[in-house]
Image (tube, rainbow, N blue to C red):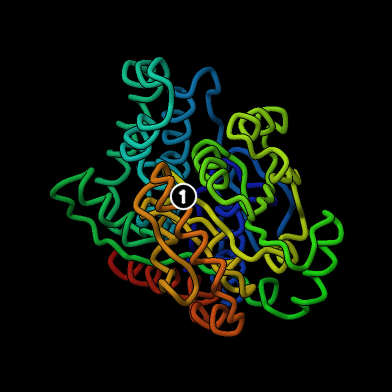
Amino acid sequence: MKIAFIKQKYVVFGGGESYVAGLMALCAKQGHDVHLIANHWQGEDESVQLHPVAINKFSRKTRVHSFADSVKRCVEANNFDCTLSLERTISQHIWRGGDGLYPMWLQRRALFEPWYKNLFNKYSFDQAAVLKMEERCVRATPHLIANSEMVKNDLLEAYPNLTSEIHVIHNGFDPVRFTTLNRDTNRQRIREQFSISPEQSLIGFVGSGWQRKGLPELMEAVALLPDVKLLVAGRDDINRLEKIANHFGVRDRVILAGGITDIASLYHALDLTVLPTWFDSFGFVGLESIACGTPYVTTLWAGSHEAIQPGINGYVISRPDATEELADAILRGLQLNNVTQIASSISDWTFENNLNKTLDVISKAASEF
């Protein structure tokens, strides 16, 4: 098959990029003719033919429309058997909503952002352009991939009377990188690095985008748990995070670690990973943590909650600002310490399984056209 993947910005990091890289490698390995349509990219891969397309960067509105138009011209000029897009475009057989749906994002951010930002979003031409393009994208695409049942339900709610076929393919983790191997050694090393005693209850928040992912709400819950320390790993503004920690009176129990590359070892050092997010289509933190033997707490507004087996590998709370519910879930999560049971609970949720299921959808879509 001659398969084209659409990604506006293809760089060497990021969940979406890792997904595309793995999928392109699998397709190339199986002998398919692999193409990438992108505006910005890094690296060279002889097994992939690049199709650079231009965009107008004047505003978000022009970026959205110009990229979609450029992709359309590229697709029309080539005889692809199947096209899979990770962007809001209108010329694909398959669209993967890996970032979730924009109408739902605007609804959720209205719950925690200041009133003036919500007012701006309501009347913004750029926001309206994204909303319109996403609906065109969804309704024009025969096959939709949702990375969680939550996203599938969001699709049906946001865009009634869809004629597209929706495939739920959960995200996957790399079982070579995220494992319980060397857990005790890594746990000791990381805890010594941050001067944390072996007996100290340590929970972790992993990821950037602190406001959307519920870090203020987590710090408020930590204020109710005097025996718990919180380690924050992410590339957010340290000064801003210090002010939030001071506001809740927990600065002496919050470790702001910044960006950490050895993330698997960090999971080994934690007793519990917590992501009380307002909006997350799925993400990778939950699977990675559980695969390393560390339980996970999140909200119903994270697609990754579908991997949680309460009382075995974590707990799910209703929403980020349910402070007492979050604090109780943290206490219960800290009691989950059967490392083998935790890790084995998601043994089938691998990246390889995800890619194989996606390739099945590509084959199905190609056979129809």
Instruction: Give percent across and percent down for residue 86.
Output: 46, 49
Picture layout, residue 239 above or below residue 115: below
Which quadrant of the figure has residue 242?
Answer: top right
Q: Residue at x 21, y 44 (%)?
A: 159
Q: Nearer the viewer, residue 227 or 237?
A: 227
**In-image side of 77 versus 185 (left or right):** left
Residue sitting nearer the eye, 76 or 64: 64
Q: Which residue is mark 1?
A: 86
Residue drawn at 86 percent across, 57 percent down: 193
Q: Position of residue 284 (x, y in %)?
A: 55, 59
Question: Helix, strand or loop at disc 1?
Answer: loop
User: Relative to residue 138, is residue 162 drawn left or right?
Assistant: left
List x then y, in percent, for residue 124: 37, 17
How crowded pointer 1 is (Cα within 10 Å; few <14, some 14-19, many 20+) is rated as many
In this view of the protein, which residue sits in the foreground, 254 or 214?
254
Image point (38%, 56%), residue name: 317
Please identify the quarter of the rendering in which residue 364 is found: bottom left
